[in-house]
Structures are given as C-alpha cells and as structure tokens.
Image: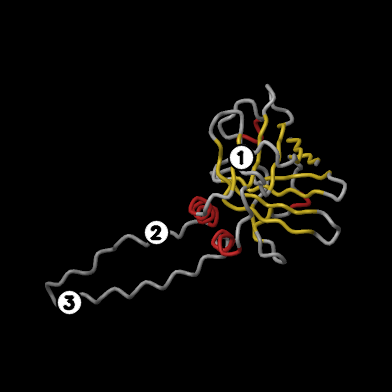
C-alpha cells in the first residue's frame, strides 16, 4: 500500500512556479522505504483525453473474407489457402499505444534520476464533495523496484499505470491503481477509470 501526501507548489521538480498538482508518496510495505513524487504541469485537454478513452471501445467486427475464385479449367490450380488476417489488438494494447502517443503533462519521479511521463490527467468533484483524480503513466510503476511489495510488481500485464485518487473535503482519502484492477471508461464521465473501483484494493492512503 502507498501513503500519499498532497504538498504545496513550492519546490517544483519541473521548475514550474505553480504546478497543477503535486503529490508525494511513500510506498507502504516497501523495504527499504520507497518514495514517489507526482507532479503535473497541466491537466489534459478533452481532445488529448479522447484517443485514450476511445482505445477501450469495442473493436469493430472484421469484414467477411472475399470468396475464393473458382478453379480455372482443367489445368487450373485451386486457390492456395492463405493465412488469416492478424487478430485486432486487444483493448489493453490499444490503450498502451494511445498512452504512449499522448503528450506529456507531468511526471512521476521515483528513487532514481529518471521520471515516468504522465500522459493523462483528469479531475472532477463527486456529488459527495470528494475530488476525483485520474492519472495515467506510460510505464508500470514499481516494475523494476525490488523494494516494492511483490503483488504490486507482478499483478499487471500492461506497460502503463492508471491511478485513481479520491480526496475528501478534510484532505484525507484513498487511491487505487491498475496494478491491482482493470481499466475501463466511466459511463457517466466518459473518463478513464478503474473498473469496479469500490471493490478494488486500496493501494494509497491520501492526505493533504
């Protein structure tokens, strides 16, 4: 599990005077301790979010194959059995490609000098007053960290991470990630989301 603290804009690692969002995270259960810094330059525009959301739409049915031509005459050869068309990419593969192609709007920094690009950043306020934040990186967080709990390093088959955070009015909340849940498009907001968010395990404890 990961404990997150929302910090002020001071000391931006991106050099921006006023980042759109800055979080620091301590990975609970990591030995030795592992920390993350999540920092946004800006939120994604609707035009930038649309290709990622569309990537999870059902793929269109393949067109029927044309009928093979009849054998020509006595000496003619029957048509060769060609290979079938390659299967369409899976929704996970389409989403991974869309995330990689999206513009960078921030970074996730770990213990090393290299950060992971944030390619999707969206937020809204829920009817109960909680702030809902969804981020997507172009790498699977913790994939190469031996200090992270094994479940977070292995319970995923995609080279990206979608993080969903919900923060209450008093500055406390929780966060979950695609490391332990599937990704879907929320029916109401049409934004990326974790499928079955309520049932997904909590990976982050969030405070302001």
Whether tag 1 and tag 2 are in contact, CB under 8 A, the answer is no
Label 3 environment density (alpha carbons within 10 Å; few <14, some 14–19, many ≥20): few
Whether tag 3 and tag 2 are in contact, CB under 8 A, the answer is no
In this view of the protein, which residue sits in the foreground, 68 or 156? Answer: 156
Q: How many marks?
A: 3
In this view of the protein, which residue sits in the foreground, 46 or 203? Answer: 46
- Residue at (37, 71) in percent of width and height: 65
Whether tag 1 and tag 3 are in contact, CB under 8 A, the answer is no
Query: Helix, strand or loop at disc 3?
Result: loop
Tell me the residue that label 3 is attached to: 72
Q: Would you place residue 173 above or below residue 58 in this image?
A: above
Label 1 environment density (alpha carbons within 10 Å; few <14, some 14–19, many ≥20): many
Q: Quadrant of residue 71?
A: bottom left
Tell me the residue that label 2 is attached to: 86
Label 2 environment density (alpha carbons within 10 Å; few <14, some 14–19, many ≥20): few
Give the mark nearer the N terminus: 3 vs 2: 3
Residue farthest along the top direction in this orientation:
32
- Residue at (56, 31) in percent of width and height: 144
Query: Helix, strand or loop at disc 1?
Result: strand
Tell me the residue that label 1 is attached to: 108
| Position in image of residue 179 (x %, y %) | 64, 42
Quadrant of image for the C terminus? top right
In this view of the protein, which residue sits in the foreground, 197 or 24? Answer: 24
Q: Would you place residue 169 above or below residue 82 in this image?
A: above
- Residue at (69, 55) in percent of width and height: 195
In this view of the protein, which residue sits in the foreground, 21 or 47? Answer: 21
Q: Would you place residue 193 above or below residue 116 in this image?
A: below
Give the mark nearer the N terminus: 1 vs 3: 3
Residue 148 in sight: yes
């Amino acid at each position: 599990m990961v404990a997150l603290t929302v910090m002020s804009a001071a000391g931006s690692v991106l050099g921006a005077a006023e980042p759109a969002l800055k979080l620091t995270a301590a990975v609970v259960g990591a030995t030795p301790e592992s920390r993350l810094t999540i920092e946004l330059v800006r939120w994604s525009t609707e035009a930038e979010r649309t290709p990622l959301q569309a990537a999870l739409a059902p793929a269109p049915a393949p067109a029927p194959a044309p009928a093979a031509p009849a054998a020509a005459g006595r000496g003619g050869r029957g048509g060769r059995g060609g290979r079938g068309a390659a299967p369409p990419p899976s929704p996970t593969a389409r989403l991974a490609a869309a995330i990689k192609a999206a513009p960078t709007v921030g970074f996730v920094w770990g213990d090393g000098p290299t950060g992971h690009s944030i390619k999707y950043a969206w937020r809204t306020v829920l009817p109960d007053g909680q702030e809902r934040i969804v981020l997507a990186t172009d790498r699977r967080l913790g994939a190469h960290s031996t200090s992270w709990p094994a479940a977070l390093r292995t319970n995923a088959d995609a080279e990206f991470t979608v993080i969903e955070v919900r923060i209450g009015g008093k500055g406390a909340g929780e966060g979950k990630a695609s490391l332990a849940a599937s990704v879907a498009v929320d029916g109401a907001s049409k934004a990326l989301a974790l499928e079955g968010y309520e049932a997904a395990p909590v990976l982050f404890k969030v405070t302001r």
